[in-house]
Image: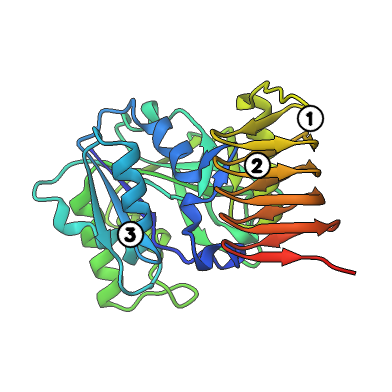
Amino acid sequence: MKIIMPVAGKGTRLRPHTHAIPKALIRVAGKPIISHIIEQLLGLNYSEFIFIIGHLGDQIRDYLEYKYPNVNMKFIRQREYKGLGHAIYQSKSAFKEDEPMLVVLGDIIFSADVVSAAESDYNMVGVMEVEDARKFGIVMVDKNDMVTNMIEKPDNPPTNLAITGLYYFKSAHTLFTSIEYIIQEKIKTRNEYQLTDAMKNMMYGGEKFRIFRVPEWYDCGAKDSLLETNEIMLARYGTNDSVYGSIIVPPVFIGNNVIIENSIIGPNVSVSEDSVIRNSIVKSSILGVGATVENTILERSLIGDYAYLHQASVEFNIGPDSEIIYTK
């Protein structure tokens, strides 16, 4: 089984950060989103990870090759953005022989029994009940949890079972054949070649899909949802640090080589390595690598790598390498 992870998206909802850093490398509770995903999958029986990269993809490749040197991985560049189905189709050349495929989107943090899903006799799709299903692909199922229909972001959803970005296919070649068909026939939804359309085409050909429940699924696509996910992850994986001359209110994560002086940090704060915080109060925020915050009160803020913030007291969303100095 190969694991396919599309990480080519531009992350427009997380700008300005994603002008300089791919979304998959933005940190939650002290480590990049993509690490939260990969470390949940390493126990699977897989032959290779294949990452579909695009926007700032070299950063993803460099990070993963450094962080996971013993993981067999390949990087394939998506040069045109034509939808998730098209992105997955880029990996076709990596499948010299037919074998199962696990697809995991690279911008979600989740908890699910992926091992059982990957051992199923059926194609599998991970789902979760949501309040507003209009933002998602959705599935309709029978009493045995077999999929009867799939709809991509419907205006009037007939169910609230949202597709979470986890898919298992028994045959990669069957999926590729279906994607080829929708591309040749120009079958698009919202002007893109969607994976849901390829899966529906597989169902028309007799392939069966079953759902598996995803009990936890966290969105990392926008600032507010990212901060909420950070809070949840810190409650589980936060550290109990103490810093002389400062007050640390857990849960927090404080990385290596961080300088904290005369400050109050927490709760729900992630401070990445090589950052500096002086004479400040920081709550419910994420600070990127090498960020500097001085004489500032921060709450619900996202501060990019190597940003410099001096003497302010508002909510910020500051991209990498920025400098803000407030003067009266």
Looking at the picture, tell me which residue is in the foreground, 130 or 277: 277
Q: How many marks?
A: 3
Res 132 seen here: no
Badge nearest the viewer, 1 or 2: 1
Which circle's residue, 1 or 2, is located before the other in the chain? 2
Q: Which residue is mark 1?
A: 246
Looking at the picture, tell me which residue is in the foreground, 231 or 293: 293
Numbered mark located on residue 289 in the image? none
Which circle's residue, 3 or 1, is located before the other in the chain? 3
Looking at the picture, tell me which residue is in the foreground, 137 or 266: 266
Q: Residue at x 31, y 28 (%)?
A: 44
Q: What type is the residue that disc 3 sits on?
A: Asp
What distance separates the C-alpha of mark 2 from that of mark 3?
A: 26 Å
Asked whether, in this view, residue 296 is left or right of residue 6, the answer is right
Q: Position of residue 268 (x, y in %)?
A: 73, 36
Secondary element type, mark 3: helix
Secondary element type, mark 1: loop
Please determine whether, in this image, residue 197 is positioned above or below residue 253. Answer: below
Q: Residue at x 31, y 41 (%)?
A: 66
Res 221 seen here: yes
Q: Which residue is mark 2?
A: 229
Q: Which residue is mark 3?
A: 58
Mark 3 crowd level (few <14, some 14–19, many ≥20, 10 Å Cα): some
What residue occupies the far left of the structure in this picture?
96
What distance separates the C-alpha of mark 1 from that of mark 2?
A: 26 Å
Q: Position of residue 172 (x, y in %)?
A: 22, 49
Q: Position of residue 310 (x, y in %)?
A: 76, 58
Badge nearest the viewer, 2 or 3: 3
Q: What type is the residue that disc 1 sits on?
A: Ser
